[in-house]
Every structure is written in structure tokens, then in C-alpha cells.
Image: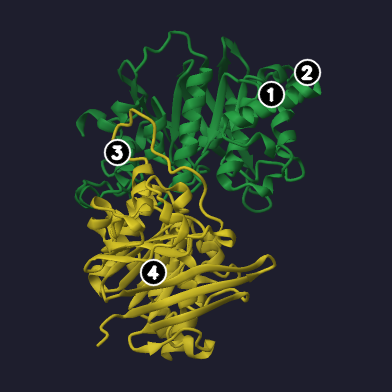
Amino acid sequence: MSQHILTVDNLTTRFATPDGEVEAVNAVSFHIDPGETLGVVGESGSGKTQIFMSVMGLLSKNGKASGSVRYKDAEILNLAPAKLNKIRGVTMSMIFQDPMTSLNPFLKISKQMTEVLVEHRGYSEEKALKHAVNMLDRVGIPGAAQRVHMYPHEFSGGMRQRVMIAMALLCDPEVLIADEPTTALDVTVQAQILDLLRDLKKDFNTAIVMITHDLGVVAGLCDRVMVMYGGRVVETGNVRDIFYDSHHPYTEGLLKSMPRIDRAHEQKMYAIPGQPPNLQNLPSGCAYQERCDYVQNRCTQSRPVLYDIAQGRASACFREVGE
Amino acid sequence: MNAIPETPLLSVRDLRVHFSLPGKGLFGKPRTLKAVDGVDFDLFPGETLGIVGESGCGKSTLGRAILQLIPPTAGQVVWLGKDIVGTRDRDLQPLRRDLQIIFQDPLASLNPRMTIGEIIAEPLVTHKADLGKAEIRNRVKTMMARVGLLPQMINRYPHEFSGGQCQRIGIARAMILEPKLIVCDEPVSALDVSIQAQIVNLLQDLQRDFGLSMLFISHDLSVVRHICQRILVLYLGNVMELADRDTIYAAPKHPYTKALISAVPIPDPELERSKERIVLKGDLPSPINPPSGCVFRTRCPFAKEKCATDIPMIETLGPSHQVACHFHGRM
């Protein structure tokens, strides 16, 4: 029955640390359809990146994921690397915030880009190079035929991010996971990269996961949004519901505390009080209770689950169930 | 907005910071990187001036050159009526009491081997050597409470604090001498959204309570709109536009300002998807070999022949509005 391209069920990711076990991701479930863009929003430490590191089998050695991740109908969580390599980089690709640390500084772009095609597609070196140049051209790198023979350090930050995107697109993936791809870039270059992602979605029906803390980026690009806090999903919904009718107090607080370029600010900015939670020492009850404007007694005693508000719309707050 | 007093606290005149770089190859001619290339502005008491631009535009170098942390190549930095460019380090020392800086990376700017009490006290120890130990500790505790740190944490080390708290420590260190000017170099860029608002509010409160002036260096035009009264837009070390906040956001005259503002995403799906955008092509050119004429012309959607040959002069459009563009009136 599943027409979803990626289905995640009850994903939990734990890390063994010297100070004990930390649950970075806790019982997270969601799905993505072809051509859809999902925004995953949260602060540092909210677990948003670790969900997709688990999905892609890229967890660090002390990390362990449980639950279920299905690509179409096939279970892919904790697959052996050899089997996973048939999927990652081919039908599912990931791009990261810092392109310099994800590119090999010792290898020319041509080598880094053709390797995957020779390996996965059985292309000849020549055919692979041609394809790589086409792809660099596609993402807007001027003089791609010459620049493909350069090293990563010869590119600017924005250009490196384009190279990363081109590399991720080599095998026409059905899912592109973008982890803060524009955070390190200037706004002018960010606008170029976001345009590029929009075109991808339109031209190739690529499903995109946009992991970000910037609600402005989400507003412009995403169809659905998943808000993370303390390793759990606290609210999901389509982009308009999240922005115009947010239910969870954390979503509401995030939206209110965003400085906006389109408004004159006369008074103080709204600020969510306190600090993001320490995953090693989460309070019993709701993780957001100490910062919440609506906290009640029961929030300290038991943890609210995700309550369905409408089709595809849920919030993990007791306010949804009434007294 | 309050009327701005007549006498500026700080006047920067034709400030230039050039770095010389070795030439390409063994016998190549030395090259010059013009990080700041002729910047003029005034800063008035109690005012916050935003300095915005892309990375590599020279905004941090400008901030450091004003504080004489990087020696300017040419120009004047007039502080309280006196040019301080070229002042010997020893003579700068008393001035530094009034001129402080807050950095972008809160943890990297704190010495990991000092307790936060020692870090915050250091300017007092340097500049007010006559104060007793107990008095210093008292003042540090008062300042900690003022910036939202628990005074009983005075003996802890920086690694025990989160990014937002480390930025509070940096602010306490800058504020302890009650300076007249603080240069804030991207003070909230490394912080989470929810913490960013807390720090912005703190800076505004301190400014009001102490009558501080601030140079707020940032690439984030949304934060700048919130905190600054006037905004200076910098591109490759040159001033493109300088205006008060409402003018620059409502009616920007320079194509670069327009492009920068239109590139900032608005957290509202309808507005963000329907707004008019000017998408600039390419990246910032190298400051080692900047374009002839107007430095912005290679990325300007409206560039004409004249822009390649003539350097646009800064024109005054209103009491507090200056722009450097040949065609600002015709866009």
C-alpha cells in the first residue's frame, strides 16, 4: 500500500557516552512522498540531524538506532554497509552544512564525482566525466568543463555547496536530504541555492528533506514541517498550518522570537526564556515545561504524546486534550 | 526616534586598511588586498550603527581598525575629537577603557584556563589597579547578575557554560568598565534562535541603561533591523549606502542593498513565496583584484557602461541618507 518513498517508524537513536546513555532521537515517525519537501526544524541538540544520520547509516560508532526505516517497501535500518551502498548516494543522497569537510581536499572534483558513477552505474571514465560536467553545469557552475579538474579549495563556499549538490544528484536520487545546506552561506548565495533546490523539485520530482533552524527557509521551500524538541517531534503539519495556526507552545515561541526583516520592531523582541534541554538530564514530563508559557501541573508529571489535531497534523501538548 | 545630538562620539574619515600579500610565484610582484577602502561615517552617543554586508566585505576589519586592533593604512578615526590613528600602544591603553568589543564565537573568545570571575575581572585589574580584591569581586558579581548569570557561578570555567551563557560572559567582560562604545562583531550569529532573542534584548537593555553606543557588525539583516538606528552597507570595503533604519528597509536606493534585503527569507509562507526578489549572480569578487569603476558592477543587474569606468561618488540624498550609485535615481 505504501506509496511513500521513505517511511520512518518509531525511530530511536541512542549514544553511549562516558556519562551514560543519551537518547538523541526518541520514537520519531514520519514519511515522505515523491516530490514533497519536508522541513525538519529544531535547535542544536534537538535530534534533527541524528534522525537522518540513522536513516543513512552514518551514525558514529557509539550510536545505535532502533525502530524501522523503509525505502519504499524495503527495510533499510542497520543494513550492512555493502547493501546500504546500493541505496545511499544512489536513490537517497545527503548534503551537509560544511561542504569543505565533506569533500576530499586531496582529490580533484572530477575524481570525486566520477567515482560513484563508475562504481554504481558501471559508466566508463569518459562517460562519467561528461555526466559530471553536465551536472555541474546544471547547478550553475560557470565553466564546468574546466572547473571539474580543480580541487575543492579552488572553489568559494557557495560554489563548493553547488559541487556537493551536483555530486548528490549524480545518480538522480529520489530523496535528497539537505542538512543546513545554506547556514554557512551569505544570504545572496543562500537565495541562489534555494532556487536551485526549488528547480530540482519541479524538474525531477525529487523529494527533499530540509533540516534547518531557519524558519524563513522553511517558509519559502517546504510543503510539510516537523518541529523537533529534546529528541522528539513536538508538532507536524503542512507549512501554512505551522506558520499561521501553530499549536505547540515551542513552535509558537520560535515563530515569535524570529527577528523579521519585513516589520519595524518598536518593542523588545520576544525571547523564549531559559536554555535548550540537556538530553542527558531531561525532566520527567514534558521536555519544554521549564520554558513554556502555558505550563500546568500535569506537564511536570507525565509527558504529552503527539495528539492528532487533523489529517496529517499533530501536536505533543496537553492543551490539545483539554482538562 | 530620539533626536540625535550634534557632536559625534566617533568620526571615521576615509579609513583604509590594505594588507600586502606576497606575489604569485617566486618573483611575482607583491599584491595589495584592500579590505577597507575609504569609509566615512559618524557615530553619535547612545546610537547603534549596523554594519552589514557579505562575508569578505571588510566589516570585521573595519570594526577592528576603528579600535586600532588592526593598524589602519590611511584615514582618520576621530574619537571624542581626537584622531587616534597611529597612537602608540601605551597611549592607547587609557582609551581602551571606553572602547570594547564582543566577538562572534563566544567560547573561543574566552580563555579556557581562567574562571569566569577572572575573565570578567581582567579589564578591571588592567585599568583600575587601585581597586581592592573584594571590590573587584563585588563589581564582577553585580555585572554577572546584570547580564543574567548567576553570581554564584563566579568560580566556574567557560566550558561549563552553553553558547548563550558564554556570550553573556563576553558581554559582562566588555561592560565591566562601563565603556562608551562597544563593537559587536556578529554577537548572535552562532546562537540558536531562541537564545539569539535573549542576547539581543540584553544588549538593548544595557545600551539604554548605560547610554552606550554600539557598532553592530552582522550579516543578518533581520537582527540589524531590530537593534540598529542607522545602517551602513559595505561591499568589498566600500560604502554602498548609509541611511536610518526605516529609510533603508522601506526605500533602499542602492541595488546591492535592495538585493541583500530581498534575499533574506521571511518566516511567512505567503509573503516569502510572493515577494519580489533580486537574485544576484555569482559570488563576491576577490578584493585583491576588485572590479574597475563601481566595485559592485559585476553582480549588479542594472550595470551600464559608465559603471565600469567611473567610480560612483557618495551622494547625499537626505539628512541621513547617502548612496554610492550612478543610477540610484533611475531604478
Chain ID of residue with mark 3 = B
* Helix, strand or loop under label 4: helix
Q: Is residue B290 above or below residue B231?
A: below
**Image spot of residue B225 (x, y percent):** 37, 33
Q: Are marks 2 and 4 on the same chain?
A: no
For the residue pair B156 and A185, the one nearer the viewer reads as: B156
Badge 2: chain ID = B
Q: Colour of chain A?
A: yellow
Question: Pointer 3: what residue?
Answer: B258
Residue sitting at x 56%, y 78%: A64
Q: Residue beneath label 4, please?
A: A136
Q: Are marks 4 and 3 in contact (CB under 8 Å)?
A: no
Pick the residue in front: B123 or B239. B123
SS class of the residue under badge 2? loop
**Whether label 2 touches label 4, CB < 8 Å:** no
Name the residue at 35% across, 79% down: A7
Q: Which chain is green?
A: B
Q: Is residue B99 left or right of residue B157?
A: left
Amino acid type of disc 4?
A: Leu
Q: CA distance from mark 2 to mark 4?
A: 64 Å
Q: Are marks 4 and 1 on the same chain?
A: no
Residues indicated by labels 1 and 2 sit on the same polypeptide chain: yes
Residue occupied by mark 1: B139
Could you tell me if the residues under marks 1 and 3 are in contact, i.e. CB atoms within 8 Å?
Answer: no
